[in-house]
Image (tube, helix red, strand yellow):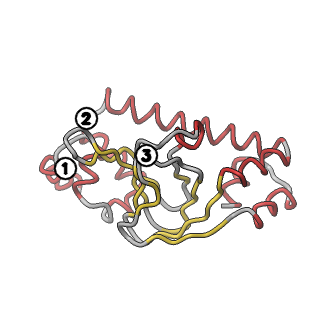
């Protein structure tokens, strides 16, 4: 986690060492939930190892995957974390997963410690917004095949670990259509 923060902002060793007393660790088994809907998200997690997915359950009871997070990425129900309202999504481990966790109080402590941490929080929030915008635009401009190709190019080593139904849901296509796309790409 420290190296990711250092890549975003030029921290002193003392500033980075503040994390040592604030980070907690957790492991999740494949299939285990990190967060369930209707609970407030009070943690931002950094994935040391594994894959997480965020999903909603629609009015028909179908799971709709809206996000994957991979090693060296952050994950949270950001809307719930910021507003302290109940989360609308669930977050689940797709593989055995190792996490580093910053809870809300720890993050507030970092923000109070100085400008660099405040600036990092702003930059990470901006990146999250840009990623959300790109995802929205991709659904309006790209085909399912193009969205798959983009995911394949950016996360090829992980894509085989994601069950077909979750991947299809994330791309907004049927599992059958995804099978045809995968055969064409591979």
Q: Which quarter of the figure is the C terminus placed in?
A: bottom left
Judging by the rendered image, the residue that carries numbered circle 1 is 178
**How packed is label 2: few (under 14 Cα within 10 Å), some, or many (20 or more)?**
some
Judging by the rendered image, the residue that carries numbered circle 2 is 143
Tell which circle, 1 or 2, labels the residue nearer the N-terminal end: 2
Tell which circle, 1 or 3, labels the residue nearer the N-terminal end: 3
Judging by the rendered image, the residue that carries numbered circle 3 is 38
| Residue drawn where x is 19% and y is 41% of the image | 60
State the image quarter where residue 83 is shown.
top right
| Residue drawn where x is 14% and y is 46% of the image | 177
Element assignment for label 3: loop
Q: Choose between 36 and 160: the one closer to the eye.
A: 36
Q: Choose between 129 and 30: the one closer to the eye.
A: 30
Q: Which mark's residue is nearer the viewer, 3 or 2?
A: 3
- Separation of residues labelled 3 and 2 (CA atoms): 32 Å
Image-based side of 8 in relation to 170, left or right: right
Tell which circle, 3 or 2, labels the residue nearer the N-terminal end: 3
């Amino acid at each position: 986690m420290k190296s990711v923060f250092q890549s975003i902002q030029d921290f002193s060793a003392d500033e980075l060492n503040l994390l040592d007393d604030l980070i907690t660790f957790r492991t999740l088994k494949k299939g285990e939930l990190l967060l369930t809907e209707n609970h407030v998200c009070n943690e931002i997690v950094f994935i040391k190892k594994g894959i997480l997915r965020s999903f909603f359950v629609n009015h028909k009871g179908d799971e709709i995957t809206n996000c994957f997070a991979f090693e060296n990425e952050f994950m949270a129900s950001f809307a719930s974390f910021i507003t302290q309202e109940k989360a609308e999504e669930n977050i689940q481990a797709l593989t055995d997963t190792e996490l580093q966790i910053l809870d809300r109080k720890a993050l507030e402590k970092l923000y109070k410690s100085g400008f660099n941490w405040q600036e990092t929080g702003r930059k990470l929030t901006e990146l999250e917004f840009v990623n959300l915008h790109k995802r929205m635009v991709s659904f309006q401009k790209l085909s399912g095949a193009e969205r798959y190709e983009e995911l394949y190019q950016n996360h090829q080593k992980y894509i085989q670990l994601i069950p077909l139904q979750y991947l299809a849901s994330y791309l907004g296509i049927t599992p059958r259509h995804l099978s045809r796309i995968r055969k064409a790409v591979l």
